[in-house]
Each structure stands twice: as C-alpha cells, then as structure tokens.
Amino acid sequence: STDYDTSDRLYFEPLTLEDVLEVVEAERAVGPVAGVICQLGGQTPLGLAQGLKDAGVPIVGTSPESIHLAEERGAFGRVLAAAGLLAPKHGTANSLDEARAIATEVGYPVLVRPSYVLGGRGMEIVYDESMLSDYLARATEASPDHPVLVDRFLDDAVEIDVDALFDGTDLYLGGVMEHIEEAGIHSGDSACVLPPITLGREDIDRIRVSTEAIARGVGVVGLINVQFALQGDLLYVLEANPRASRTVPFVSKATAVPLAKAAARIVMGDTVAQLRAEGVLPALGDGGSLPAGSPVSVKEAVLPFGRFLGADTVLGPEMRSTGEVMGIDSEFGIAFAKSQAGVYSDGLPTSGRVFVSVANRDKRAMVFPVKRLADLGFEIVATAGTADVLRRNGVTVTVIRKLSEGVGPNGEPTSVGAILAGDIDFVVNTPFGVGPRLDGYEIRTAAVTRGVTAVTTVQGLAAAVQGIESLIRGPLSVRTLQEHAADIEALRSISEEVT
C-alpha cells in the first residue's frame, strides 16, 4: 500500500535493481532483512528477482528459478506436458516466411505478438495470410533479435481467470472468474464475473486440479494467477503468472478473504492449513466453492476513450484499460448493471433507440438479445444487412444509412449523424478486424464523442440485456462492501455447521 499509515516504512523509489538494493541496504542498517517478496508488485519485480538473489538478497516465496519456469515458454511447456495439460498450438518465428509456416501449421485464426511485451502490446488476432503479412509490415519486423510469437486462437472459447495460493503442499483456490467477453480480449479489458455463471462444478473441479498441478510443477510459494480457455469440453492453459495479478483485490472483496495477507504469511513459512485454523482463510471450501446464496460480483474495465477521441473502442488482445470498477449484488443482471453505472455516466439505458450493426460472423448470435430489447420496448435501428437478418427473425427494425452512403435525398441521417445528434441511446457494433481503416470505426468514435453506451462484442450485448432487464424491474439497491462480506461469512458459518 502507498498509504503511509499502513506500513512501518514506505519508500517511493523506481522499481529498478539499483534502487531496490539501496532500500535493502537502508533496511539492513537498522536490522536484519528476512528477505524480499517479489510477487506483490506486478510483473516488474519478477524480473528483478534473479538480480537480487545474485546480490545476496534472500527471495522469500517463489524462487527466481521457479519464476523462470513459468515465464520462459519452453520451460513452461514442459511443465504443462508433465502434468498432462493442454495449451494452444504455438511457435516462434524469426522471419515472415517462418510466421506464415507456423500459422499454416497451427491453423488460422492466430494470435501474433512480439516476444517479451506486457499488457498485450502489439498483439493482434489475424484471420488469414494477407492480414499476417500486413501485421508484420505494420507492427513489428520478425528477426532473430525480435522474434514473433504465433499462437492458435481459440474461437468461441470461454476465458477463465484463477487466483490461488499454494504453500508447496496445499492449494487454496482464491477465486474463479469467468470472462464475459470470449477468449481473445485482454484479461485486463474483459468484464468478468465471480462466481462463474455458466461453469459447472465439474469444470471448476478440473480448474482446481489443473491449477494445483501448475503451481506444484512450477514450484510456487504464495500467489499464482492462471488463465484458462474452455473450448467445448477441452480446457486449455493460456498462461500462468507466479505472482499477484490485477484481479487479487477484486477477488478478495468478492469472496471476503484477504488473499494478500494470506500470501504474505505463506511466503514467510505458514501453511494453508495453519491459516484455515486461524481463520485467515475459510475453515472449509475455497473461492471456487462459495456457499449457495453468495453475492455475484462483476469486474468491469474503465477505458479512457473519452480522453482519446480518435482511439478505436474495439476490444482485443492489447490491453487499453486504465482502471476497474466493481458491481456486486444478489444476481448477475443487477451486478452487471451496477458495474456499467460505474463506467458510463448514464449507465445502461432502460428505453430509447438502439443502433445495431454487426459483423457477419455475429449476426446469428445477436438475434435473440436484440429481439429481447425490442420486446422490452426499445426501438431498433440497423444498417441494411443487419436489418435483413433481424426482420427474418420477427424483429421490427428501421433501416438507417451508413456513413459511406451519405445523407438521404430527404435528409435521412446516417448512423454516425444520428449518434452525434443524440438520437441513439445504445450502440451495438461488432467489427471484423481492428483499426481505423475498417467499417464501424466512425460509429464507435461517434458513440464515445456523444457519451453513448456502446458494446463491441455479442457477449457484452447479452450481459447488457440482462442488466437492462434488471433495471426495468426496479431501482438498484445499495449496500456496503462490509455488509456483503458479512453475508458471505454468515453463509460460510451455516455451511460449516451443516457439514
């Protein structure tokens, strides 16, 4: 914490090896230093662990050697293979020809990115060879010094985030978060829900076993974050981070368990069993088996598009969010609506006009959510292609002109003109690809300029419809986080008594 009332001593210094060593020397001047915890400061401290160890500083918790096992792709692949876990097919390319060959072998679409980047910078989903060539010409040049990673992209997969504690023997599953957007959206930008709303108990049991196998294989002591993708019945491991992730504060609030405190105790030698006995962790169960009736929590990303009006709002594998909000309530729809109220000044609309324009691949999936909006009393307007699909499915829809078609002979506005004029209350636009050159960029930019709530994925649309239904049923109630935590503790006590 950067609160000076929280820690005994607080240093504001850059996270570099030189500066951290200076802090260590300052601490050694007043007493012995038990060690340095590298897993609670994000990704940067992990890169300092080996240098600190080489300088004679004890590293408590996960060792530098174990960090390497999780961070180095080849070594981590061997850990997964030994545990019998699946990972998407992948390869490393040092040239355009190698990238083409790997993409052909693993199968399009593929996820491509420069190696050794954070936050998904420079990462894109490409669907064919021409897009791959364009990416390599525009974003990065593949070479032995700057290799490009090519991964099979898992279409129609559910992405899952897991935060867990491991003491070398026992695992405590802190929380299982189901992403609302499909795999391919950066985990920092995707909304997620805890407990999961579509995963069954068997899925969560598989996730728990897989997480423990990874933690044991890597040699984690303390916190670990694992990202999975569930495609049909196949569970894939996307990556593992031997540290606290950005979701730990959210999981701690959603489950009423102080994960950071527990992690600090574990790295200093305490066990999960001890922490259960002391009440730091629940005596029974974990974050993957919350008691029935526990509140539902939604994490939503805060995206800075209002300050960068020329930026495209399409979500993708490159992280763009600058913050997060949390909605919590007894059911998913209300929790999601609360999260949107924290992101958009007006939250989700409960009436008005909805503009819909989606890519061909999304047209089938968007029919039922849009039909539900029409049933709730919204007026639906759409571009010609989308309107045809909606009409064939019994939705009353008004066709609106594309920007490229210009204003009509009788002054009929374009979609962009209608948004800028304030005639649209909700925008649904899912593009094919990324970048200003593609159709839909102007629509999304107009929505940001006008402050209109907009979704760019079908999954986001379905969640928004549930939120809108909840808002129409009645006003939101407000309770403190402490009240929700007390509810969870009471439910745990009842569950333990029954057990």
Image (spheres, rainbow, N blue to C red):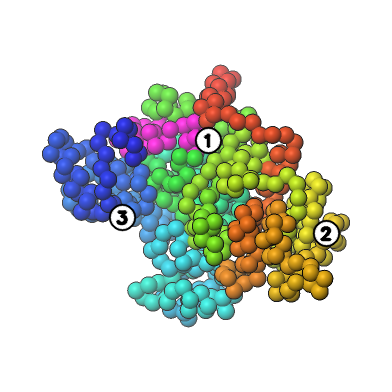
Image location (x, y in percent) of residue 466: 70, 44
Query: Could you say which disc has been placed on residue 47 in the image?
Result: 3
Q: Secondary structure at mark 1?
A: helix
Q: Secondary structure at mark 2?
A: strand
Q: Which residue is mark 2?
A: 397
Query: Could you say which disc has been placed on residue 25 in the image?
Result: none
The structure residue drawn at horizontal position 19% and vertical position 44%, both measured from the top left corner, is 24
Quarter the N terminus occupies? top left
Query: Which kind of residue does numbered mark 1 sit on?
Result: Ala
Image side of residue 465 versus residue 95, left or right = right
Q: Which residue is mark 1?
A: 254
- 284 and 460: which is toward the camera: 460
CA–CA distance in space, label 2 to label 3: 55 Å
- 198 and 439: which is toward the camera: 439
User: Which circle, 1 or 2, is nearer the viewer?
Assistant: 2
Q: Could you tell me what secondary structure mostly forms the magenta stretch? A: helix
The structure residue drawn at horizontal position 79% and vertical position 68%, both measured from the top left corner, is 412
The structure residue drawn at horizontal position 48% and vertical position 76%, both measured from the top left corner, is 138
Image location (x, y in percent) of residue 370: 76, 53
- 8 and 88: which is toward the camera: 8
Image side of residue 391 versus residue 422, left or right = right
